[in-house]
Amino acid sequence: MSELRRVTTGAPWEDTFGYSRAVELPNGLVLVSGCTSIVDGEIAGGGPYEQTVNAFNVAFAALGKLGLGREDVVRTRMYLTHARDVDDVGRAHKELFDAVRPAASMIIVSGFVDPSLVVEVEVEAFRGATA
């Protein structure tokens, strides 16, 4: 591959703020933008565990458009609004990635664009990670 590949999902903020959901670099590294539990304009899942699973599913869908999956994930970042949610978010991450074991960070932040959101995730994948 000699050029960037970009994935868009039609989410309204992609056009409003001018970004792609995912970008694959020529070296096979794939960067997935911050993903939340907003699906079809609505927050899917109320609690931190459910929001985490839904947010990672948004990221997995973007990876899928590039022919990649969770097994190709090499790094995750989880941003939370409350330290009390660490265990729920961590449990969701373990269920999704226990067999993959990417490098991971969990960071407490002051808030998100929608105050109903309690978690946002970022994913980095690598084409050939399972080769």
Image (tube, rainbow, N blue to C red):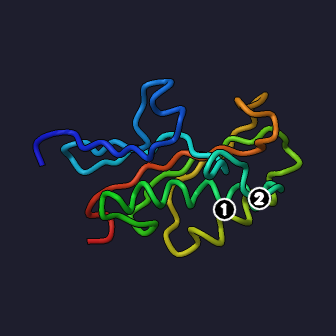
Look at the image and tell me in which quarter the C terminus lies: bottom left
Residues under labels 2 and 1: Cα distance?
A: 9 Å
- In contact (CB < 8 Å): disc 2 and disc 1: yes
Q: Position of residue 10 (x, y in %)?
A: 45, 43
Comes first in the chain, label 2 or label 1: 2
Amino acid type of the residue that numbered disc 2 sits on in the rendered structure: Gly
Please tell me the numbered disc located at residue 53: 1
- Who's the residue at 57% across and 51% down the image? 104
Q: Which residue shows up at 81% across the image and 59% down it?
A: 87
User: Which of these two is toward me, 26 or 105?
Assistant: 26
Quarter location, residue 114: top right
Occupied quadrant, residue 126 = bottom left
> In the picture shown, does residue 119 fall above or below 57?
above
Residue 74 located left or right of residue 42: left
Q: Is residue 68 left or right of residue 50?
A: left
Q: Looking at the image, which residue sits at the far bottom?
A: 99
Residue for point 45% across, 29% down: 15
Q: Which residue is mark 2?
A: 45
Q: Quadrant of residue 68?
A: bottom left
Q: Nearer the viewer, residue 12 or 78?
A: 12
Q: What label does residue 128 carry, if any?
A: none
Residue 98 percent location from the top left of the image: 58, 72
Closest to the camera, between mark 2 and mark 1, is 2
Nearer to me, 40 or 119:
40
Is 28 or 51 nearer to us in this picture?
A: 51
Q: Secondary structure at mark 1?
A: helix
